[in-house]
Image (spheres, coloured by chain):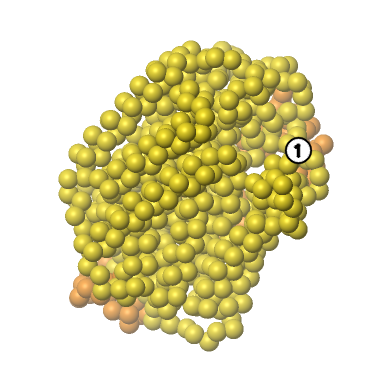
Chain colours: A orange, B yellow
Amino acid sequence: MPSSPQDPSSPTPEQFQQVQRSEDFSRLRSSFRSFAIPMTVAFLVWYFAYVLLSTYAEGLMSTPVMGNLNLGLLMGISQFLMTFLITWLYIRHANRNLDPIAEKLRDELEGEH
Amino acid sequence: MEFGNPLFNIAIFLAFVVVTLVVVIRVSKQNVTAGDFYHGGRAFSGRQNGIAIAGDYLSAASFLGIVGAVALYGYDGLLYSVGFLVAWLVALLLVAEPLRNTAKYTMADVLSFRMRQRPVRTAAATSTLAVTFFYLLAQMAGAGALVSLLIGIEGRVGQSIVIAVVGVVMIAYVLIGGMKGTTWVQIIKAVLLVTAVGVSTVWILALNGFNLSEVLGKAVAEHPDGATILEPMHQYGTSGASKLGFVSLAIALVFGAAGLPHVLMRFYTVPTAKEARRSVVWAIGLIGFFYLCTMVLGFAAAYMVGVDVIGTLPGGSNSAAPALAYALGGTVLMGIISAVAFATILAVVAGLTITASASFAHDIYNGVIKEGSATSAQEVRVARRTAVVIGAVSIIGGILAAEQNVAFLVSLAFAIAASANLPSILYSLYWKRFNTRGSLWSIYGGLGSALILITFSPVVSGAETAMIPGADFAWFPLTNPAIISVPLGFFLGWLGSVTSSETNELKQAEMEVRSMTGAGAEKATQPH
């Protein structure tokens, strides 16, 4: 099949299953999910809060805050800052907590033949 | 109002075409295998690919359209740019790295990984072609509209000739350069676009003592609607349906980006998942910076050009950005901005063409018709021929659609991507129980419902601005289908899976371990 070339150097399906059941792999999976899922929920909540408040609470979003900048404009700009912040947090998490385990498992799998 | 010098604009644009063609020819000397053609030997660094992603993503619609929308409607224009950017967090957190680790060339590679190959591959290729087609039409139609303004060519015949020229140059990029050449075109274009927009923004802020509030104040003073442009729902607040339509658009934007096949295919041009992650970081930085700048440019256009003047320009609000460049830096800046905008269309069209031709050659021709037995040389030959056919179809489609609303076509592409592609991508990466029936129901259900709802919406008939103004067969009141079709795509994926007993534990184990660790993933085939 085009998606999974069976050249002799790739690990066997059984090896993959073995790794999937290993402790290291469940640590990797839970470390990834416990970061990615709450973050996804958080940015979706903040994004849809901005969209829904802009749509259905125009008065509130028009409250002046700084000079000509009102609450809605600041909340819009905050979406940019949030995106940059979550990107930075994810990179830090991945470099520190995900990459070392992923590399270890990959070396085990690709070295075993 | 007359502004700019058409000959100067054409000269700068031709210089871009010549320079990029030389680069494409130089880098494409060793395009031999299917891999070289589809992903440039996976030899791009994360930074290069990130800049190229920004090049693919920042289309003329987002540049000209958003500046114009902010100039006319203020606050409501911003809502687009926020959605376009936040969407990248879905790609970064959930899609980019596992995708790079599991697949080879196309989106269908991921979706069919642990499913029955032929039906799922066909479904994924169908939705790839559908999304790409609508995106292509929008870009080609935009090219015609832009040209009348920027290089002074008016009338249908002149515009049609320009659309045909764009199509031919784009086919040349793809045939000669493959993915590698196309990627370099994206990189050059993205650097030019972001630099031009960044310099203009700093210039405007410098004129206002680097005080954003002052820019807003001047816009309010000059705009006929005054302070209301800083408040929401100036454009969308006319009725309950238009408000809900806006919420639906917001759903399409945030879930659409990570399902756009031409963006997904970019993740295969880098050697590792870590470089894929780095690409997204670069893309987020550039795209975020770009959209912050368009906000400043939009408000600046409202007072430097004036809303009344924008209304009289050929091309309407789409001309706000070039007109602002003229007010700011005269003929030279206007020429540069115009040429960059035009180059943007060319580069995005090339990226879309290579995605569609790769999907047809790799998924339909090799995966379904030849059942994986075609050689790499055969596949590339089919991909090249497909690129020519797609080029021809998009030239004709672009000429026919020249009068259509560009924003509508782009939002349709995002809505289809969010409904048909994203649910099955997320399920197949993260839900063990997902299977062939779930994939098919999710892809076809999302695709079909999005297309049906659009057809029977006020965008197509029953409104003054509709595509078929005379007819009225609309029964769906919203201008964007995502609020229904995205949840439906997710629901059908779940329902199809739980009603089918098919499971493939070994394949699921392989996919999950590969996606998380990169073991057994495709390696770079050309040195860095």
Foreground pick, B72 / A66:
B72
The correct choice, above or below, for B203 with respect to B431 in the image is above
Q: Residue at x 81, y 48 (%)?
A: B240
Q: Quadrant of the N terminus of chain B?
A: top right
Disc 1 is attached to a residue of which chain?
B
Foreground pick, B270 / B377:
B377
* B212 to the left or right of B90: right
Q: Residue at x 35, y 21 (%)?
A: B11
Image quadrant of residue B22? top left
**Residue B154 visible in the snapshot:** yes
| Residue B381 horizontal/vertical position (percent) | 25, 59
Q: Residue at x 53, y 40 (%)?
A: B402
Residue situated furthest front in the rendering: B157
* B525 to the left or right of B421: left
Element class at badge 1? loop
* B187 to the left or right of B453: left
Foreground pick, B255 / B141:
B141
| Residue B383 horizontal/vertical position (percent) | 31, 58
| Residue B493 horizontal/vertical position (percent) | 57, 72
* B104 to the left or right of A75: left
| Residue B92 horizontal/vertical position (percent) | 47, 52
- Which kind of residue does numbered mark 1 sit on? Met
Q: Residue at x 73, y 42 (%)?
A: B464
Residue situated furthest bottom in the rendering: B501
The correct choice, above or below, for B13 with respect to B517 in the image is above
Image quadrant of residue B62? top right
**Residue A96 visible in the snapshot:** no
Disc 1 marks which residue? B233
